[in-house]
Image: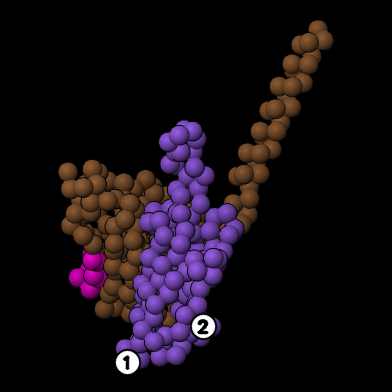
Chain colours: A brown, B purple
Amino acid sequence: MQTKRRAFLKGSLAAGATGVAVGAGLLTPRAVMAAWPNKAYEEATTQADALKAAWGTSGAQDSGDVNLKAPDIAENGAVVPVTASTTMKADKIAILVEGNDHPLCCDYSLKNADPFLSTRIKMGKTSNVVAVVHSGGKLYQAKKEVKVTIGGCGG
Amino acid sequence: MASRSVKIRASARGDMVTVKSLMKHPMESGLRKNKKTGKKIPAKFITEVTAEINGEPVLVGNMSAAVSKNPYLSFKAPGKSGDTVKISWVDNTGDSDSGEAKVR
């Protein structure tokens, strides 16, 4: 009886400690990134959902005025250089990867800056890279397929 | 060291400034595993970035773990030679840093 009671106490204490640790681990980042649109980045699994969560609108139409520069073949999916720009007057730019589990990579609000943005993104597999521009309350997009070579050295 | 985590190069052409910056950050997604221990590497990535020219915000952005390690960011904004460009970031663990440079 005595030994069982010991074991039981030990077990519940350990469980309690992990519970607290997990709780703290989960809570701190949430509290810290209050302004970060968690829904758009961590919950949305489609482009439409992500854009809706981030900007409140979705349903982008293809436009020739949006330019997306990305490589045809990316040898290393961890570093894919992407440049998005547009000739329209835009106030927001986002870059998405269709094939990623969570498509939204980054979104920027342009306070006074030109609609030009260049960055490097990660891609899990070959898929379309999408640049979406928010202009005059509407969304315009440009797509480009980027082949990702898993092997890293062209093979 | 901390002050070197954001590198900025800004050059003026006419009344536009082209800013190129590199932020030193691991950008861990939280999905990778440590090969030796098999334990997951905790997520650590930049969530918010703000760029200012002479104290005026020009670009405010959100990032996810799908942005490459040591994020590169380039943008264009109105400005002139001698202006101060400041870029600051906050990551998901609450760490933050910033860097400043003069426009050439």
* Residue A68 among those drawn in magenta: yes
Residue positioned 68% across, 28% down in the render: A15
Q: Residues within 10 Å of mark 1 (few under 14, many from 20)?
A: few
* Left or right of A41 in this view: A59: left
Considering the numbered disc 1 on the image, is that residue within a helix, a strand or a loop?
Answer: loop
Magenta stretch prevailing secondary structure: strand
Separation of residues labelled 2 and 1 (CA atoms):
19 Å
Q: Which three-letter amino acid code belongs to the residue tagged 1?
A: Gly
Which contiguous range is marked in magenta?
Answer: A60-69
Dots 2, 1 in contact, CB < 8 A: no
Residue positioned 78% across, 16% down in the render: A6
Label drawn at residue A147: none
* Residue A90 among those drawn in magenta: no
The single residue placed furthest to the front in the displayed view is B1
Q: Which residue is mark 2?
A: B56
Q: Which residue is mark 1?
A: B14
Q: Which three-letter amino acid code belongs to the residue tagged 2?
A: Glu
Residue A53 is at least partly visible in this image: no
Which quarter shows the C terminus of chain A? top left
Q: Quadrant of residue A35?
A: bottom right
Q: Please give the chain letter of the residue carrying mark 2.
A: B
Q: Are callouts 2 and 1 both on one chain?
A: yes
Q: Please give the chain letter of the residue carrying mark 1.
A: B
